[in-house]
Image (cartoon, grey):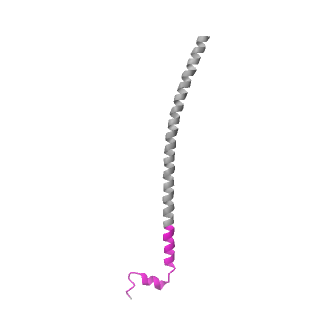
Amino acid sequence: MPEDQAALVSSLREELRQCRLELAQVRVEQETWAEELSKVKEQRARARARADQYAARVKRLESRRTRWRRLPRRALRALRPDADRP
């Protein structure tokens, strides 16, 4: 019986060692994934900021365009490149 118990203890110790090794590998993998996730989050934040800048620029350009449309026709005619011609 003590031999069986010693073999069982030895087997359990080996299994525990394997589990600890696997746990260490999983931790390393988790750190790698966490780094990649933070990089992706940074990229998304930069892309979102760029999109906001472009949206603001488009909004400014559109508001300028609407101002031009509100000008009277004769003012628009005067602003055309061929305005000097009759």
x 49%, y 43%: residue: 35
Would residue 71 be counted in the magenta stretch? Answer: yes
Residue 9: x and y, percent?
58, 18
Residue 31: x and y, percent?
51, 39
Against 37, is 82 above or below? Answer: below
x 50%, y 53%: residue: 44
Considering the image in quadrants, where does the C terminus appear? bottom left
Residue 22 located left or right of residue 83: right
x 49%, y 62%: residue: 53
x 48%, y 63%: residue: 54
Against 10, is 84 above or below? Answer: below
Identify the image quadrant of residue 85.
bottom left
Considering the image in quadrants, where does the N terminus appear? top right
Magenta span = 58-85
Residue extending farthest to the bottom is 86
Residue 70 located left or right of residue 85: right
